[in-house]
Image (cartoon, rainbow, N blue to C red):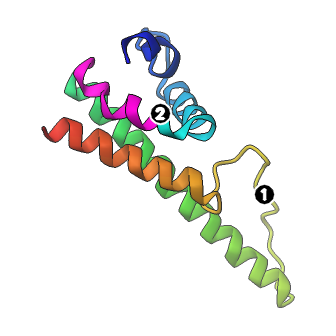
Amino acid sequence: TNLMMNSYFPTSTNTTGAEQVRRTLTFLSTNPVPASVFYANLSKHLAVNSVAKLAAMLLKCLVAAVEQDSTTTKKKRRRKYGQQEDDDDEETANALSAHNTSLMASLAETICCLWESVRD
């Protein structure tokens, strides 16, 4: 875990929360099993406050993805039935989507692992 800290959880002062979330999502997408182990052990190497902040940021991403997909689904239904929408913001290819069930499951599991590690 210590060797991977700078790559997947950089703690330098110029690293933003958005960058930490981006790296977490990339790690979860590309290597879900090692990512799960890494985040389960993160609290052994960081302060509780840092781990809790990451869990909160990831939870916000999870909720935002579900809300975004819900909104998109409603817009598609309105278009299907002939109602016009002023907003034409479509999801981008790189957007976090609740339809990506494997990533959403990994994200939820990671939040649980982080929460459990803080609780212990």
Horizontal arrangement in the rendering, residue 67 relative to residue 109 (left or right): right
Instruction: From the top left corner, tell me how far across and down residue 29 is, in percent.
Output: 61, 40
Instruction: From the top left corner, tell me how far across and down residue 73 is, in percent.
Output: 69, 74
Tag 2 or tag 1, which sits nearer the N-term? 2
Horizontal arrangement in the rendering, residue 54 relative to residue 120 (left or right): right
Q: Secondary structure at mark 1?
A: loop
The type of residue carrying mark 2 is Ala
Q: Which residue is mark 2?
A: 35
C-alpha distance separating marks 1 and 2: 32 Å
Q: Which mark is residue 89?
A: 1
Q: Secondary structure at mark 2?
A: helix
The C terminus: image quadrant: top left
82 or 116, nearer to the observer:
116
- Identify the residue at horizontal 57%, vertical 35% (top origin): 31
- Identify the residue at horizontal 47%, vertical 57% (top origin): 63
Q: Which residues are magenta?
A: 34-46
Write down the quadrant of residue 5 in the picture: top left
Q: Is residue 68 above or below residue 95?
A: below
